[in-house]
Amino acid sequence: MKKNKSNYQSDDAEIKAYREMVEKHYQRKEKEIIEFDNSSIAHAEVVTEYLFKYAIENKTDIKIFTGRLKANFYDKFLEQARTLLRTQKISIICEKQCEEGRFQALVGDDDNGEILNINASQDIGVSHFVLAGESAYRDEKSDALKTADASFNGHMRGSFLSVLFDEIKNKISLLS
């Protein structure tokens, strides 16, 4: 797969091709472990959409560890979040203060939603990630470049991210 630079400009044909590739990996999630690249915000939107789809179909929770929970990014997933919150949980940890937006308000106001703010003065050295269940994830390699690895069946890395999220959450609780 072609690697893209940080000044990447996505076009409709490229995003359509990327979506088709993600769909193919999503459909084959039970047959093979595939980890694929994500190299732009537009790619991140496609992968996040499929992670919500995965969580809804498999009745799994979503865990998000992020810097600020950018409203202009996450507000695009309101309907999927509403569907998921009917039966599952969405837990979010923000390194900094989460941006206010409709997604943040929905999750924060729902009994199945949880948002914790670390309010760190600097990055704590943990990659940002979105995790659906124990094996579907988008794990950032670089927040600045918006590059990440993603998989719908990466059980080892997914389990690691889940334990990491829970450990961070427990540490925050101890500090409160």
Image: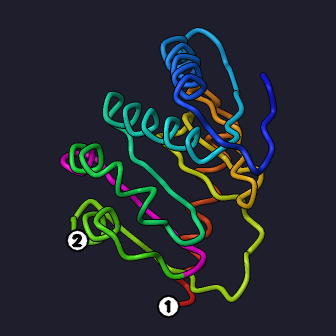
Report which residue position mark 2 lands on: 109
Measuring from the top left, give residue 13's x and y in whole percent.
55, 22
Q: Residues within 10 Å of mark 1 (few under 14, many from 20)?
A: few
Report helix, strand or loop for mark 1: loop
- The amino acid sitting under disc 2 is Asp
Task: For the N terminus, give its image quadrant.
Answer: top right
From the viewer's side, name the closer residue of 174 and 54: 54
Q: In the picture, residue 143 is in which quadrant?
A: bottom right
Q: Residues within 10 Å of mark 2 (few under 14, many from 20)?
A: few
Q: Please, is residue 53 above or below residue 42 in the view?
A: above
Q: CA distance from mark 1 to mark 2?
A: 20 Å
- Tell me what residue is drawn at x 60 percent, y 25 percent: 14
Q: Please, is residue 30 above or below residue 55 in the view?
A: above
Measuring from the top left, give residue 20's x and y in whole percent.
52, 17
Q: Is residue 63 left or right of residue 55?
A: right
Q: Is residue 169 left or right of residue 34?
A: left
From the viewer's side, name the closer residue of 37 and 88: 37
Are circles 1 and 2 on residues that touch, CB within 8 Å?
Answer: no
- The amino acid sitting under disc 1 is Ser
Report which residue position mark 1 lands on: 176
The span picked out in magenta is 84-96
Q: Please, is residue 74 above or below residue 110 in the view?
A: above
Find the residue positioned furthest to the left.
Answer: 86
Color style of the picture: rainbow
Measuring from the top left, give residue 94's x and y in whole percent.
53, 72
- Tell me what residue is drawn at x 34 percent, y 48 percent: 77
Report helix, strand or loop for mark 2: helix
Residue 86 part of the magenta-drawn span: yes
Q: Is residue 95 left or right of residue 122?
A: left
- Mark 1 or mark 2: which comes first in sequence? 2
